Amino acid sequence: MKKNYSLIYLTGFSGSGKSTIGPLLANSLGYEFVDLDQTIEKQAGKPITRIFAEEGEAYFRELERTTLEELGNKTNLVISLGGGVLENDHSFALVRESGTLVYLKSSSKTLARRLCNKTDRPLLKGENDRKLSREEIEDKITAILMKREPRYESANISVLTDVKRIGSTVEELTRKIERYVRKASPATNNQ
């Protein structure tokens, strides 16, 4: 698969801002926004939690991979990836080879604050669906981040989403992406 510089993949932990920043970034770049998880849910006709419960994680990861392959053939897209997509070796390679990977980075403390009242995050529940305290959520996020961070950190571009206003983050990302594409794209380098 040939690298496509008009495919922007947003990665980061749940709560890092992918769903909020993604549509704004797409608009700023003149691209379309696609949420990978929502696309999978639409194609499967059921929510991801039900896919996991009924079909299992392996089946979901296969849906994720085939959907990524389909999207990898398009142009002018900002694609929000689920937090665990990059854990799959095939999906990770596909993203790295087909477009520009952008990491929206947040601290465990910020993520815990943003996610402590979310009830639809199975990774952040205790045994028997027990609601966790903010400290327990932060500890769990820290443990998951330690595992995922090496792949997140391999992104072509990263930006901290802890303290800045969303508008400032989108402006910073737009500049970084445009600069990266200008430097990396063979088409602009051969002119």
Image: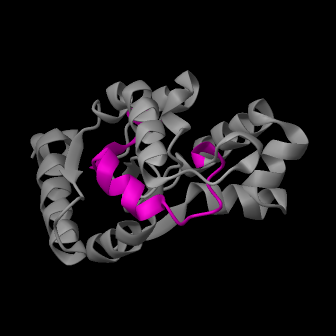
Instruction: Compare residues 119 and 51 and report the one nearer the observer.
Output: 119
Residue found 20% across the figure and 52% down from its top: 159
| Residue 6 magenta | no
Quadrant of residue 148 within the rendered picture: top left
Is any part of residue 75 visible from this angle?
A: no
- The front one of 18 and 190 is 18
Q: Residue at x 40, y 63 (%)?
A: 114
Which residue is more in the foreground, 128 or 13? 128
Residue drawn at x 23%, y 59% as measured from the top left: 162
Q: Position of residue 40 (x, y in %)?
A: 70, 55
Q: How is the image coloured?
A: one colour
Residue 131 vertical placement versus 65 (above, below): below
Q: Position of residue 30 (x, y in %)?
A: 33, 74
Q: How many marks?
A: 0
**With 39 as the anchor, is 84 left or right in this view?**
left
Report the span colored magenta: 95-124
- 35 to the left or right of 146: right
**Quarter of the image where one finds residue 178:** bottom left
Residue 155 in percent (x, y) is at: 29, 37
Inspect this view and state whether residue 10 appears: yes
Left or right relative to 167: residue 149: right
